[in-house]
Image (spheres, rainbow, N blue to C red):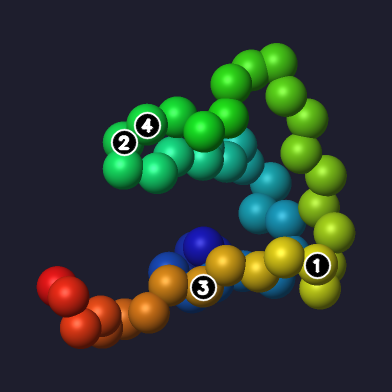
Amino acid sequence: IDQHGLPSDVPTGHSTFIQADGEPLLQLPASLEWHQNQIIFRGAKDVSWA
């Protein structure tokens, strides 16, 4: 997310933490490489179950 709270399509220059349901999915040491147009995750603003 960029400084305006919008999804970013470029590296932001700060650390990224990956979690799901409060459980860490990524443990260090690890290396992430940025590849545009590969896998993009976007969340819905409204979901039917919430």
N-terminal of the pair, mark 3 or mark 2, is 2
Q: Is residue 29 left or right of residue 18?
A: right
Mark 3 crowdedness (10 Å alpha carbons): few <14, some 14-19, many ≥20: few
N-terminal of the pair, mark 1 or mark 2, is 2
Which residue position is annotated with label 3? Answer: 42
Q: Is residue 37 left or right of residue 47?
A: right
Mark 2 crowdedness (10 Å alpha carbons): few <14, some 14-19, many ≥20: few
Q: Position of residue 4 (x, y in %)?
A: 45, 71
For the point 76% across and 39% down, which residue is it?
Answer: 32
Q: Position of residue 9 (x, y in %)?
A: 70, 70
Mark 1 crowdedness (10 Å alpha carbons): few <14, some 14-19, many ≥20: few
Between the residue at mark 3 and the residue at mark 4, the CA separation in whole angstroms equals: 19 Å
Identify the image quadrant of the C terminus.
bottom left
Q: Position of residue 43 (x, y in %)?
A: 43, 72
Between the residue at mark 2 and the residue at mark 4, the CA separation in whole angstroms equals: 4 Å
Which residue position is annotated with label 2? Answer: 22
Q: Nearer the viewer, residue 9 or 25?
A: 25
N-terminal of the pair, mark 3 or mark 4, is 4
Q: Position of residue 45 (x, y in %)?
A: 31, 81
Q: How many marks?
A: 4
Between the residue at mark 3 and the residue at mark 2, the CA separation in whole angstroms equals: 18 Å
Secondary structure of the residue carrying tag 4 is: strand
Furthest residue in direction top, as rendered: 29
Relative to 35, say whether 46 is above or below.
below
Secondary structure of the residue carrying tag 3 is: loop
Furthest residue in direction left, as rendered: 50
For the point 64% across and 17% down, which residue is it?
Answer: 28
Residue 23 has which mark?
4
Q: Nearer the viewer, residue 32 or 39?
A: 39
Kindly identify the amino acid type of the residue bearing the numbered disc 3.
Arg
N-terminal of the pair, mark 4 or mark 1, is 4
